[in-house]
Image: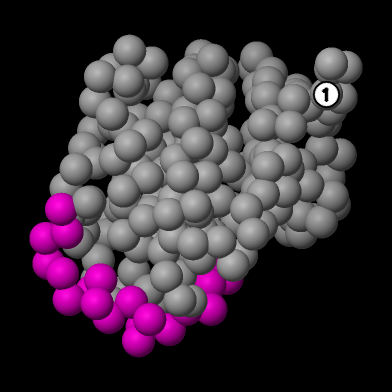
Amino acid sequence: MAPIRLEMLSGSVLTFDDPAPLIRLFVGPDGIDGYDDWARRSPPDHLVAEDVTVLNTYARARSGHVHWQALLDDQAPAWLADIDPGWDAAMTGESAWERAGIERRVEAAFEAMCGPHRGLSVVSKMLHLKRPRLIPLLDALVVEQLGLGVPSQATPEVKAGYAARVIAHLAAQARSNRAALVGLQRELGAEGIELSAIRLIDILVWSSHPAASLRAPIERHIRVLPRPEQ
């Protein structure tokens, strides 16, 4: 298995020499996680109440249905329709990404969704349910590892711009590690673990954080290269 090498926005580099054990620990011994299982079944064209239930049950969200009601009432959100379900962070080439304006469309979706009790982390988790091959989870540990945070009190516009920039960066990392990610997906798929390339990346970034609570102790086999001197 080829190593996976991820550049952070801070300039440091994480190298995962043996990423499969980290993924196995993350999903658990039965290889099934309620959140990722629902991401394969959630309706792709609108939000439903079960999406919110799944976020709060499996994804450590604390955002009640009342805070999502206006979005749940929209049965055909244009900002979601503008994000093609076929776009894949690892497989959609850079030129296609630019031609389609994917970063701009992702930014519009985050701006539409961010609001009271719907911060960057929980919105990314909701959008991943709808576009699991394109949108990573941007929880606090992932954002901290990436090295470029955004204040919690920032406006939805600021949060959306940050999210779009981060997702474009992680998509570039997915493309540069495409062969290794495909190999990892093949290995895990034989065990019944089916995750998109961008989901594998956010799990690996999360697992590299010292505060990450994996299900069992493990030697993580992660090398961190410091940010180059300017």
Question: Is residue 57 at least partly visible in the picture?
Answer: no
Question: Is 126 situated above or below 116?
Answer: above
Q: Residue at x 42, y 70 (%)?
A: 115
* Front residue of this view, candidates 183 and 93: 93
Q: Residue furthest bottom?
A: 66
- Does residue 63 show up magenta in the picture? yes
- Does residue 140 show up magenta in the picture? no
Q: Residue at x 48, y 76 (%)?
A: 117
Q: What crowding class fits label 1: few (fewer than 14 Cα within 10 Å), some (14-19), or many (20 or more)?
A: few
The three-letter amino acid code for the residue at tag 1 is: Arg
In the rendered structure, the answer to whether residue 206 lies left or right of residue 176 reads: right
Question: Is residue 106 at least partly visible in the picture?
Answer: yes
Q: Residue at x 37, y 74 (%)?
A: 52
Residue corresponding to mark 1: 227
Query: Quarter holding the N terminus?
Result: top right
Indicate the colouring scheme: one colour
In the rendered structure, the answer to whether residue 43 lies left or right of residue 121 reads: left
Q: Residue at x 56, y 18 (%)?
A: 177
Question: Is 105 situated above or below 76?
Answer: above
Extent of the magenta region: 56-78
Find residue 181 and report its horizontal and vertical position in percent: 53, 24
Find residue 94 and report its horizontal and vertical position in percent: 38, 16
* Front residue of this view, candidates 79 and 177: 79
Total marks shown come to: 1
